[in-house]
Amino acid sequence: MPRIVLPNGLVVLLAEDHNAPVVSMQLRYRTGTRDDPPARSGLAGLVPRLMMQATKHVGKGDYQRMLDAAGSYASGWTVGMDRTMINVSVPSERIALPLWLLSDQMGFLVERLDSEMLDEQVKSLLNAHTQTIDNAPAGRVPGLVISALYPAGHPYHRGSFDISPALTSISPDDVRAFVEAHYRPEQAILSIVGDFDSVRALALVNKYFAPIGKSGDAAHVSGDVPSLDHEVRMVVAARVELPSVTIAWPTAPSQAPDDAPLDLLASALAGPRAGLLRWKLVDELKIAASVDARQASREFGSEFWIQVTATRGHGPRELVSAVDAVLGRLQTAPPNDYVTQGAMTGYLMGPLFAVERSSARADRFAECEEYGVQGSCITHWLARYTSVTAADLSAVAARELPLSKRVVAEVYPSAEAPIAGELRDSPPAGQ
Amino acid sequence: MSASRPRLRAVVLLVASAACAPAAGTPVAPTVTPKGAAAPVSGLTPDASFRSSLPPPEPHRPSAPPRFTTTTLSNGMRLMVLERRSPNLVGAELVVRGGVSGWPQESPAAISLAAEVALHGAGPRDEKGVFDAMNRLYAEIKTVATDEAIWFHLRAATKSFDPALEMMRDMVVAPSMAQNVLDFERQHRLALVPREPDDLWLVGNRVLFEELYGAAHPFARWRQHLADALAAVTRDDLLRVWRRAVDPADATLVVAGDVDAAALAGRVEQLFAGWKHDPSHVSPQPPPAPKPEGPRLTVIDRPGAPQATVLYGATLSPPTASTFLADAVAIQLLGGMASSKLTQTLRYELGATAAGATSFWMHAGASYAAWQGSVDRDKAADVLATIAQRAADLRAGHLDLEELADAEERIARGPERDFESVDGLISEFSILPLYGLPADEFSTRATRVLSLHADDVRAEVPAPETMKAVVIGDMSVLRPKLAALGWGPIGERDPTGAHLAGR
């Protein structure tokens, strides 16, 4: 099964699977919100919306209409800090349709752009921002924490969903320049999985994508893995029902040796099978209503997050003390087999069954290509986890999660504060 | 690391190798450059005539839904098996009809808790023993009670399936219902109750169910405030509801994946032989007909909310009704498809929402659909008016035949996406025993959908005056424009979804 590099630099991955009459594809651009110009943040979130609305040869609203008419499902896009992914699944006989649509997005968006289209999509983006940040309970907290973890000037400092006020006044030319710099074939991976014939598919890919021009002078941002030399504490008041605390550390970047152990550490702390924090804070001490932990992996540095919501009568500082006691023990003594195996199976079962779907495999293969994985992608992915030991979990907790170098956001309920929260100098009176 | 690590790793790699089998292969070397490819170019992309026309579809290769075998065991339990040799994974779902709505004389909280507690200790294993065994087997079992069934969901590598199924059997037949587990599960749920007002969709759907089905309807009842009911549940309650609600006569085990159907039938017969049908068992009652009540429009006050959260729904035909597929198509036209005229109007012409859409959920007795979205609060009334007008237009026969054809295609081909995975097969095929649908449900679906006439669909679009709207947001801001809709008195609720005192 070939990996093809078109002369314009587009990497194409083809994996036939005739289990069901479905073809899934992912077009992954190696660009995201990290590439947003400082005065134009939000552009990366805008581009896929524009791509799905109209391009030179596809009329306004016709992208979704044509996909729906073809019996498509699971079409959509995702914008992260590092990448933008457009996903489509169609009945297998319609394989040419998404290739035609995706190639028109890559080659012919800029010629179609106009102010009316731009205004519509800016409104849509602002609505999404309000939904995700301003109307979400304590919705500003993740952005505040990210800004404290990554120094000003770092490509991640503004978080994944920052929108500059200037976005409402950008012109089609601003967008054109951004698109021509970042959404070109040499910055993209096209991963196709499912019920198709590779020779025929390759002919279609060549027809639609090979003529697309390269950028030639794309600018790539870069950033160092950040580090903290002290603890940053912030107090947030929000119109929420219960106090909570968010604790975050800057951690090893995606695919680094500590990355997979940190995924499993999160599962050991708060996963469905293990749950050292859950057992202690929810079951035993009864000071927490819920506990969550996760490693958010990124190219220029990751974050490890612990989020705990208190039960009535308990507060953020009590939660932090209890979390520290659990982490302190884990940093000095490996967890037992029950926790270690529970963390591993709890983390892997979902993805293992999900990867049966062609859409999940298209995503996994594109990720392997992005990170230069050699050999069998899924075996490589699993091996990163199955080689982790209990001692590794303890060591990575000590190395990556120092209790004195992190960001702690204490969130206090306040009827006077915005729902999304605002920074305060001290906790509200009486709390 | 423990001695168990090599075994765990072996199982994982066994599964991994299956997932990477040639049929589902990984694209690796060689890297090639296609012959005759155009030379690299910089800058603009040259246009070409082929870019101006929609590519024609490839020849359609007819495909049939996966075949399955059905067996009835000696205790009355049914077994459905879908064989799929690769990859090396098996999924199973034991569906016991009834759920929290099937036993009106029992507390919904007790049935819901019983399903959760049953997972945490059964047969010879206590809670730790259950999870330790699942970890060592590399298997996963989950249990849950929903409106219409108690579900036991199992996923395992082929080699682990038999012992995992035996564990699941213990949960069905001999759950410990331990007091300490009941106390923990109850505590977990009660601890989350104070946070509910921050979960807009939970509170919104709770109120929408009350308005659509009636507050006393079982679908609405168990979504209402459960704190008191949770606190009152005893271990005896769990044991009683289990005896009443879990009987092989109402149970079907659906298995998909790398199994041999004939061999499995014998093994399942053997495993479940001890689970006897209780002759005094009464099968669950079908849910009563909805009795919608209350105002056409309700506002849940959320002071300071910068946006409005809108739910606007209707009850529809149950899955067994002859009109069900026409309902499903109608909902695609009423905002179910991203390309529907309604969705395009709300998102781009009105600029009111980023992702609002209509979803459709099957339910015995009466299914339901609701448009749900986060909306610019100044346009919440416009959104409701636009949806109501579109429903009225569709009912009046203003259907675009091209849009109708798109909607039918989506419904006709919808299940195919699930036929590529064990999880998807289980999900699709378990609805057959749940709703008593015929064995040819999927093989005839496309024909039935594509033979629908515009009038069939038009007649199933909900009448706007029968639909119920719930808007969550700052009441002081929302009220004037919502009142101007002229939809009658507006219901007012507090952030928990409770009626505002004195109103």
Image (spheres, coloured by chain):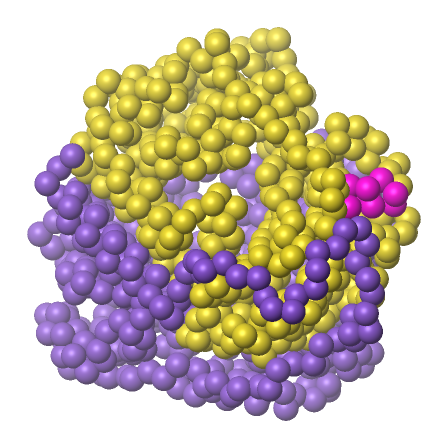
- Say which of A203 and B319 sits in front: A203
Q: Which chain is yellow?
A: A
Residue A299 x, y percent position in the rendering: 53, 34
Residue A177 forms part of the magenta stretch: yes
- Between residue A153 and residue A272, name the one nearer to us: A153
Query: How far from the left and from the top, in percent, is residue B481?
Result: 84, 47
Q: Main secondary structure of the magenta part?
A: helix
- Measured as percent of width and height from the top left, residue B188 is found at 35, 37
Image spot of residue B480 (x, y percent): 84, 44
Closest to the observer, A21 or B239 = A21
Q: Which residues are magenta?
A: A172-180
Residue at x 51%, y 76% (from the top left corner): A197
The colour with which the image depicts chain B is purple
Does B429 sit left or right of A151 as displayed? left
- Residue B418 in view (yes/no): no
Up-down: is A358 above or below A237? below
